[in-house]
Image (tube, rainbow, N blue to C red):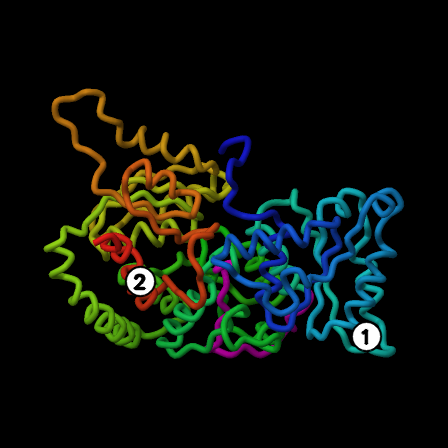
Amino acid sequence: MSNYVEQPRYLCALGGAVGTLNALPKTIPILHAAGGCGGNISNALNAGAGYLGSSYCGGQSLPSTNVYEPHIVFGGETRLAEQIENTLKLVNGDLYFVITGCMVDMIGDDTASVVKSFSGKSQGKTKGKTVLSAETGGFKGNSFKGYDIVLETLFRDYVKVAAQKTPNLVNLWGIVPVQDVFWKGDLRVVKALLEKLGLKVNTFFGDGETLENLKHAGKAALNIVVSDVYGITPAKAFEEVHGIPYLSVPLPMGVQGSRLFLKAVAGALGIEDAFVQRAIRDEEAYFYSYYERLADAYNDLDLQRYAVIVGDSNYTQALARFLADDLGWLPELVVVTDFLDDPEKEKVRARFSGYVSGLTPKIVFDTNTTSVRRHLNDHWPKNRGQRYYDNFTPAFVLGSAFDRELAEDLNSPHLSVTFPISNRVVLDRAYAGYKGALSLTEDILGALVSAR
């Protein structure tokens, strides 16, 4: 791991918390942070997440204490109480959640005590309002850390303990809102896959979700975490408080990834294999009915490519397997840009093996954008005047908007698929599952033929 981050591909923990809370229905984040934090975060989220927009009570409308010098010297707890009181009166929400910035965490404001004083209010417009809090100072980590902190707080303090479990109900998380720019579409597709197994699915952040689904998530039989790293700490907290086990599975993408996903979930829940195979056959019949149309163009136009993949641990493993096993490409280099400890790296690294194609990409963990070219040179050295040289071409780069320069250097097409994405507008696009892989194929091959 490098000792600095050049062109970071995420926000701070506070930014991750804002993105997570804005994705929950009728949830109002209240920032207890320095003036400017909220504005900077909303601008970064909007521009980096395919022009996300402000959502309900997001963007420049975020309630914030905007603390400055006097509060840093004398404490900002009185200012926080004032802000909570006014927000409860003026902003219509079903859940209010105080999150903190670096300054107030460093001076030691007792945010939890201030918030607790509102839980007993029973007068006027604040009656019956639910207010939670979590310390999310930016120095605690990046966007993924903010996501984990918010989820753990919700699972401990908001989700009701249920004595009775519903056998076919599952909770799904690990697809991080905003940080995964395609989170809404991906949640929709993965939820539909699980419903093929006869399951009822809470995604918390997807279309049609309500806070009631979250509040009663303690009735589920299983928690499914679509990540090896993110959402694991909240899953352990959920198991501790609610007694519900969790299954950690990689993000499914394409035929091979989706097969593995469905079989893993079915195995954890004891679903009959014949039922699983029927669901897989249905999905693959649909998938291949469209892929068959590609065969002539793929072969006649020679659309196979070498590939460089750059991004977070969730997306890089899914993309590499899809390219190698479904699209028939050659993923040569994968650069994982997350901050991970050694055990986490080994978990992630293990996902880049066992491909049906037999391919094994080179895996590198590095947070810095300018290092990607060096890692490619190490893996595929430049021509040093050799008479015979196998050139790294034709190539394709899948990464973020930061990786366009690498693509230009390689004289290859590029597609932004991981945060930050500032060169595309993203609405309900999905890349997960079978149907998402069709969209991804369209976008990749569309980039190849766009100049024809």
Please tell me whether residue 70 belongs to the stretch shown in magenta. Answer: no
Question: Vertical placement of 394 versus 438: above or below?
Answer: above
Q: Is residue 165 magenta?
A: yes
Kindly tell me whether residue 22 is visible in this rendering: yes
Q: Residues within 10 Å of mark 2 (few under 14, many from 20)?
A: many
The secondary element bearing badge 1 is classed as helix
Where residue 419 appears, as percent x and y from the top left, is 47, 51
Q: Which mark is residue 269?
A: none
Spatial separation of the CA atoms under disc 1 and disc 2: 47 Å
The quadrant in which the C terminus is found is: bottom left
| Mark 1: amino acid | Thr
Residue 314: x %, y % from top left? 42, 53
Q: Secondary structure at mark 2?
A: helix
Name above or below for residue 287 compared with residue 253: below
Foreground pick, 237 / 143? 143
Q: Is residue 106 above or below residue 421?
A: above
State the image coordinates of residue 69 (x, y, percent, origin top left): 83, 43
Q: Residues within 10 Å of mark 1 (few under 14, many from 20)?
A: some
Q: Which residue is at the front of the view, 154 or 329?
A: 329
**In this orientation, does residue 259 appear?**
no
Q: Residue at x 27, y 63 (%)?
A: 255
Image coordinates for residue 100, horizontal then vertical, percent: 72, 53
The residue stretch that appears in magenta: 157-176
Q: On the image, which quarter does residue 77 sit in?
A: bottom right
Q: Which residue is mark 1?
A: 126
Residue shown at the point (65%, 46%) measured from the top left: 138
Residue at x-position 50% and y-position 42%: 340
Q: Which residue is mark 2?
A: 437
